[in-house]
């Protein structure tokens, strides 16, 4: 009979078979479960990290492409701005140079005009009393109404007797015809003259004379004499004479 301590509750005892392999297996299963859980957590974290990094890389590439495009556009704009600056500078310089050239040309033209005027005055003063001159102009009435005798004498002053004066003269009547101013050349009024420019060639003087007939309705006011000498001295004459008729 086993020993029983007084006052203590009896303990029931059960006999269990001893299986050391089962405990080891359980321990291995627990360790494997922990390892699988840890691996799964790490794999999920890695996958999430990879996706995040890929998204960030895609965003980075897109931003890099946009930055590259902006840089190219900026460089193009810089080049255009530089070209425009150079063109503007060239235009300003060219405009200034053209303005200076035009100013100089205007000044030169003004100076030449003054020189021409001066030399013309000198020549006119020197030739005023030499070369071709109008010596005489007469208009005489005839017995026929509207018909007149004319005589124009052209002379060469300072003639040496050897040199011919060569040129031409125009003889025109200016007046009113049916309330309108009318100019009639001598060739339209005289049967003697058939040229508008009456030829001059003489040593001392040349007479231009004949009869002229006024057309009906024409009232003469003055006579225009325009003469040009080409040799020996170039000279021009433009003079007006009143219509003065000498009676027979």
Image (cartoon, rainbow, N blue to C red):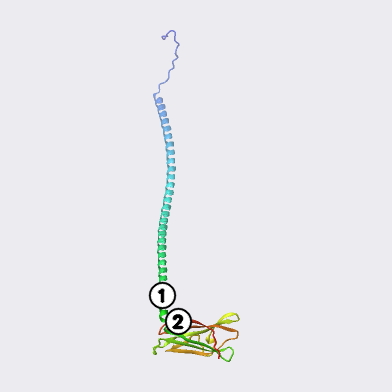
Quarter of the picture containing the C terminus is: bottom right
Give the left or right position of residue 242, taking residue 17 as reference. right
For the N terminus, the quadrant is top left
Q: Which mark is residue 236?
A: 2
In the image, residue 62 above or below residue 111: above
Q: x%, y% of residue 232?
A: 40, 85
Q: Is residue 59 above or below residue 242?
A: above
Residue 127 is marked as none
Q: Which residue is at the far front?
A: 247
Residue 32 position by quadrant: top left
Residue at the spot 44% in from the left edge and 38% down from the top edge: 48
Q: Separation of disc 1 and disc 2 at Cα?
A: 17 Å
| x and y percentages locating residue 174 in the rendered image | 54, 82
Position above or below: 150 against 18:
below
The x, y position of residue 23, in whole percent, is 40, 25
Mark 2 burial class by Cα count in 10 Å: few <14, some 14-19, many 20+: some
- Camera-nearest residue between 205 and 34: 205
- Closer to the camera in the image, 63 or 141: 141
Q: Residue at x 44, y 45 (%)?
A: 59
| Earlier residue among tags 1 and 2 | 1
Count of number-bearing discs: 2
- Please name whichever residue, 77 or 177, is drawn nearer the observer in this view of the structure: 177
Q: Are marks 1 and 2 in contact (CB under 8 Å)?
A: no
Element on which disc 1 rests: helix
Q: Which residue is mark 1?
A: 118
Residue sitting nearer the eye, 28 or 136: 136
Residue farthest along the top direction in this orientation: 6
Query: Looking at the picture, how far across and down is residue 69, in whole percent?
Result: 43, 51
Q: Is residue 172 above or below residue 18?
A: below
Instruction: State the SS at label 2.
Output: strand
């Amino acid at each position: 009979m086993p020993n029983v301590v007084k006052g203590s509750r009896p303990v029931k005892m059960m006999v269990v078979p001893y299986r050391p392999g089962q405990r080891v297996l359980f321990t291995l299963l627990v360790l494997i479960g922990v390892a699988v859980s840890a691996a799964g957590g790490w794999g999920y974290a890695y996958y999430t990290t990879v996706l995040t990094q890929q998204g960030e890389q895609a965003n980075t590439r897109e931003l890099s492409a946009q930055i590259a495009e902006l840089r190219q556009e900026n460089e193009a704009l810089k080049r255009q701005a530089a070209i425009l600056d150079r063109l503007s500078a060239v235009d300003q310089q060219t405009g200034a140079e053209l303005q200076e050239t035009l100013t100089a040309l205007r000044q030169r033209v003004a100076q030449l005009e003054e020189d021409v005027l001066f030399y013309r005055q000198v020549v006119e003063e020197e030739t005023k009393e030499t070369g071709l001159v109008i010596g005489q102009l007469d208009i005489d009435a005839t017995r026929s109404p509207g018909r007149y005798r004319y005589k124009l004498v052209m002379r060469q002053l300072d003639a040496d007797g050897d040199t011919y004066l060569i040129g031409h003269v125009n003889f025109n009547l200016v007046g009113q015809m049916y309330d309108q101013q009318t100019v009639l050349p001598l060739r339209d009024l005289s049967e003697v003259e058939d040229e508008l420019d009456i030829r001059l060639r003489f040593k001392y003087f040349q007479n231009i004379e004949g009869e002229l007939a006024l057309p009906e309705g024409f009232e003469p006011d003055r006579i225009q004499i325009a003469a040009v000498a080409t040799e020996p001295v170039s000279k021009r004459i433009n003079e007006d004479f009143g219509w003065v008729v000498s009676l027979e």
